[in-house]
Amino acid sequence: MTYDLVVIGAGPGGYVCAIRAAQLGMKVAVVEMRKTLGGTCLNIGCIPSKALLYASEMFEEAAHGLGALGVVVAPPKLDLAAMMKHKDDTVAANVNGVAFLFKKNKIDWAVGEGRIAAPGKVVVKGEDGAEQTLETKAIVIATGSDFARLPGVEIDERTIVSSTGALTLPKAPKRLIVVGAGVIGLELGSVWRRLGAEVAVVEFLDRILPGMDSEVARQFQRMLEKQGFAFHLCHKVTRVAKAAGVLTTAIEPVAGGEAKTIEADVVLVAIGRRPFTENLGLEALGVATDRGQVVVDAHFATNVPGVYAIGDVIRGPMLAHKAEDEGVAVAEILAGQAGHVNYDVIPSVVYTTPEIAAVGKTEDELKTEGVAYKAGKFPFTANARARAMRHTEGFVKILADAATDRVLGAHIVGFGAGEMIHEAAVLMEFGGSSEDLARTCHAHPTMSEAVKEAAMAVEKRAIHI
Ligand code: FAD
Ligand code: NAI
């Protein structure tokens, strides 16, 4: 049989692409070497981390948040095995959901490692070494990414862990060192701090969360420090020595200077992710890559006819929803439609306490690009619902073009930020202005009123500050 489309990799990019292509009438197969569908995101990424983030947040709330609301409970006890079961059940429900969707859409799953032998030919090597060849009109590479290694520091996934090991620790470490103050470090650092670990974060740069608005990052760092995080900014880890169950970590100022050591039971290395293309046969096929990324044009086509790529393996933010939208777009392009992704409006969320959410330009980017803009800000301390829930930390910032008032960016630090950001995303997709947002009636009392007030603050007419 000849397929219309063979997708390699069943992460959010690949599985969504396959489903959309099947909806459009294509005969589709997906090659996936993992034992379950869903890729990094569903198995060892977004989903298990969010299950642990939610559960650990509830643990902390029960210990420190409920009393102030007049809800008196005995100090909570941690049943880590039950918490891990909640995480595993959540993962199972999601990966099984994708298997169900494959059946529903008549998508074939070829289990094994895929290699592109030639345009239109994908060889699948099963666990037993047996190979089969799938013939296809088009191939989409959606092989995702893998964690970056720190030279000289070997990940054993027990005491020196990547995010994968950090999702399955058998007990809360007493002391955790996180290398990298990015999204993974702060999310998984939060999980284990809430469950009892002292967390020290070593970051190469002079700030946390690179890429996020620097005002947001500065204020958020102070919030994390109040929670007990210790930060060693402008430092790099040069060595991790293991002796008698203790990890002695040598850290050194990036600018040079005296090295010091800090001790821990577990070290989490979270210094970024790299595109994954091992054994795919790209070199032999002549597919162009750039620093590991598969190079694609605006229509996700590589330089080899009939071979496309999406998700973490190509340029752009390594986010599940970005991969999904690219999956839909490339399927529609293959079906002769006008699939498209608007890279100017891709929200991103850090699922910490409080949450951080952003869409569009940061203030730093607008300054660098020389764009004249106006900023409107509103703090949650002035929001009635936030006070009623004791979630007054944080603020909303709306950035609008000084001449046209078009909203160019929105940044939220606060409880529920990851949900609230989408009203700004929809507004920006429609090219809306801060006035459009300011004149949209918002239900009272809601946290979202702070978004409206921040939009009103762009023209200095916020009511409650
Ligand atoms: P992947 O999800 O990496 O899937 C690729 C799949 O391809 C894998 O299953 C792999 O086994 C398979 N594969 C690779 N090579 C082959 C081959 N040759 N043959 C067969 N199969 C192959 N993003 C968010 O948006 N929100 C979050 O909250 C979030 N949390 C995260 C938390 C963690 C701890 C991590 C690690 C990542 C997180 N991410 C999050 C990022 C997100 O997981 C990725 O952006 C997303 O999974 C990328 O999707 P993808 O389809 O490109 O690739
Ligand atoms: P990251 O790129 O977010 O952060 C890595 C951090 O490590 C950076 O601050 C960087 O300066 C620092 N760093 C790099 N080398 C270092 C070194 N040698 N010593 C000290 N610090 C060093 O990468 P992270 O956190 O590993 O996450 C990978 C990707 O996964 C991210 O790009 C993100 O898009 C995705 N992700 C998304 C989530 C979300 O959307 N909520 C959650 C988790 C991951």
Image (spheres, grey):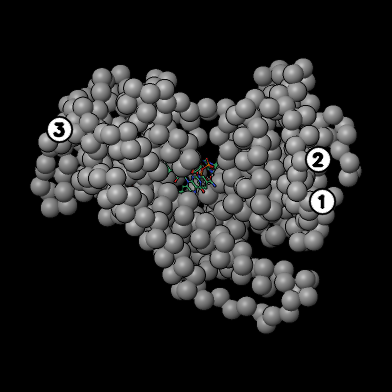
Gap between marks 2 and 1, in whole Å?
Answer: 9 Å
Residue designated by label 3: 2
Residue 454 or residue 222, whichever sits in front: 454
Residue designated by label 1: 383
Gap between marks 3 and 1, in whole Å?
Answer: 59 Å
Q: Amino acid at mark 3?
A: Thr
Residue 272 or residue 457, whichever sits in front: 457
Q: Amino acid at mark 2?
A: Glu
Q: Are marks 2 and 1 in contact (CB under 8 Å)?
A: yes
Residue 453 marker: 2
Task: Look at the image and tell me in which quarter the C terminus lies.
Answer: top right
Q: Identify the residue at horizontal 56%, vertical 46% (top origin).
A: 183
Which comes sooner in the sequence, label 3 or label 2?
A: 3
Q: Identify the residue at horizontal 32%, vertical 26% (top origin).
A: 335
Query: Residue 311: which quarter of the image?
Result: top left
Vertical side of 158 occupied by 431: above or below: above
Residue 278: image location, x then y, percent: 28, 38
Mark 2 crowdedness (10 Å alpha carbons): few <14, some 14-19, many ≥20: many
Which comes sooner in the sequence, label 3 or label 1?
A: 3
Mark 3 crowdedness (10 Å alpha carbons): few <14, some 14-19, many ≥20: few
Which comes sooner in the sequence, label 2 or label 1?
A: 1
Q: Amino acid at mark 1?
A: Asn
Q: Determine whether, in the image, residue 384 is placed left or right of residue 29.
A: right
Extreme residue toward the bottom, this view: 74
Vertical side of 211 occupied by 304: above or below: above
